Amino acid sequence: MAGVRGAQRGRARVGVLVVVGFMVAVGAVGCGGSSSGGTATRTAAARPAGEPFAHPGVLVSKAQLDRVKQRVKAHEQPWYDAYRQMSSSKYAAADYRAKPYAVVECPPDTRPGQGCVEEREDAIAAYTQALLYDITGERAHARKAVEIMDAWSKVVTKHTEANAGLQTAWAASSWARAAEAVRYTYDGWSDGDLLRFERMLRNAYLPQVRDGSADFNGNWDLVMADATMSMAVFLNDHATFDKAVHHFRTRVPAYFYMKSDGKLPVSPEGSGIDTAAELQKYWFGQKTFEDGLSQETCRNFKHASYSLAAASHMAETAHHQGVDLWDEAKDRLRAAFEFHSTYQLGAEAPKWLCGGKVQRDMGPDTEVGLNHLRGRLKLDMPQTEKYTEQRRPEGTDDLFVAWETLTHADNA
């Protein structure tokens, strides 16, 4: 049974529900947080020291969740079809059962892993069940989300093998979203179980991703930073949040090129990759650089798309916390979305681009960026809009992106 602090968390949630309609940020008793119904976004270098985090505020805010609930109830499109897609998925099953592992082993080669798929899918299932609870109000979904998270927090201790950083980031991103959506809207997660889940994130996940991965391809670094920021907000960890903000500010310019960078791309901070030859090799042999090109465009669009999603997740979470990373990177991200959407839609690749051959395999990764850049900022993004509308409802990649037509389509 939840103790005194559990009751305090319940009172904090009531406060969130009351004030959110007025778009006011207030302290949450016992939670170290505040509502995120419409927090004004600052362009300051970082959050003022000690200012409470806004909750729920990992990728999706309370105001956004409320709009989704209203639209689904009214059977409005595309949200209703997106809801039906999510609610009919395997992740939404009432009898879903977690498959936790003490040690998650994810090799980079053909050797069989242990717990890799199970961990990612269970984390997405927890997030799916949390969203279902927030939309329908059915407590069985909240109980299922908590059941899945508790199953892993009782067991998992570490991640091993060369893909540990990426695997940890994928799973942690979904764990943090799920936990955030439940903790501040549901009063049935006991103090002891919640604290054990927090320890799991701090001990088995955060150390793997907090410092990034400067020498690997940029999708690793950006997904790791996404996970770091998401966990920081849930854990009310200001130092880790600021570290993730710094990571965004240094890694996004080093991954998505703009002509204002100069003749060569920005070198990833701490990587030692800085000569023309090293950068060209790092950019998969590309020697001509145009606005919106990514470090992995000539590898495939899939990994560039992962990075667009991760960067968008970070900017959106920071937006809910009053830090305007969107404004800082809007031209770069807009160019990257438009560049990749143009060729994904079938435009012929010129010879200067990857030798005239590109691998068109973008994923369901555009809704969050489109919502802010076109929706809030009113920037022209015809190619991204066309690509996104053709894919709706955008579902899940079964890695770290899930149900973003539902949560972010035209949801400022």
Image (cartoon, helix red, strand yellow):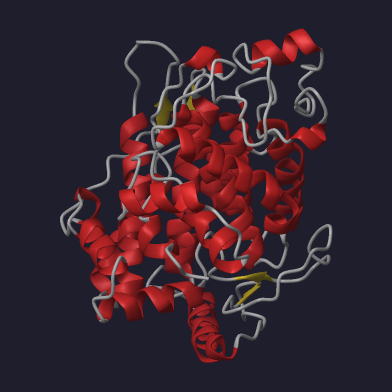
Q: Is residue 13 left or right of residue 232?
A: left
User: Which of these two is toward me, 301 or 111?
Assistant: 301
Q: Looking at this view, name the residue that lies furthest to the top.
A: 277
Query: Which quadrant of the figure has residue 403?
Result: bottom left
Can residue 246 be seen in the rendering of this structure?
A: yes
Q: Residue at x 83, y 28 (%)?
A: 262
Classify residue 40 as left or right of residue 196.
Answer: right
Q: Position of residue 175 (x, y in %)?
A: 45, 50
Q: Is residue 212 above or below residue 81?
A: above
> What residue appears at the point 43 percent right and 43 percent down from the top-left corner?
400
Residue 186 visible in the picture: no
Image: 11 above or below 71: below
Question: Which quadrant of the structure image shows residue 327?
Answer: bottom right
Front one among 156 and 137 = 137
174 sits left or right of 246 in the view: left
At 73% from the left and 36% from the top, the residue drawn is 258
Residue at image coords 29%, 78%: 137
Q: Count the numbered circles shown.
A: 0
- 314 to the left or right of 61: right
On the image, the x and y values in percent for residue 141 come to: 27, 66
* Residue 260 in the image: above or below residue 122: above
User: Residue 212 location in percent, x, y?
Assistant: 67, 33
Residue 189 position, x and y percent, is 40, 68
Of residue 93 and residue 354, the one placed in the foreground of this image is 354
**Quarter of the figure that contains the N terminus:** bottom left
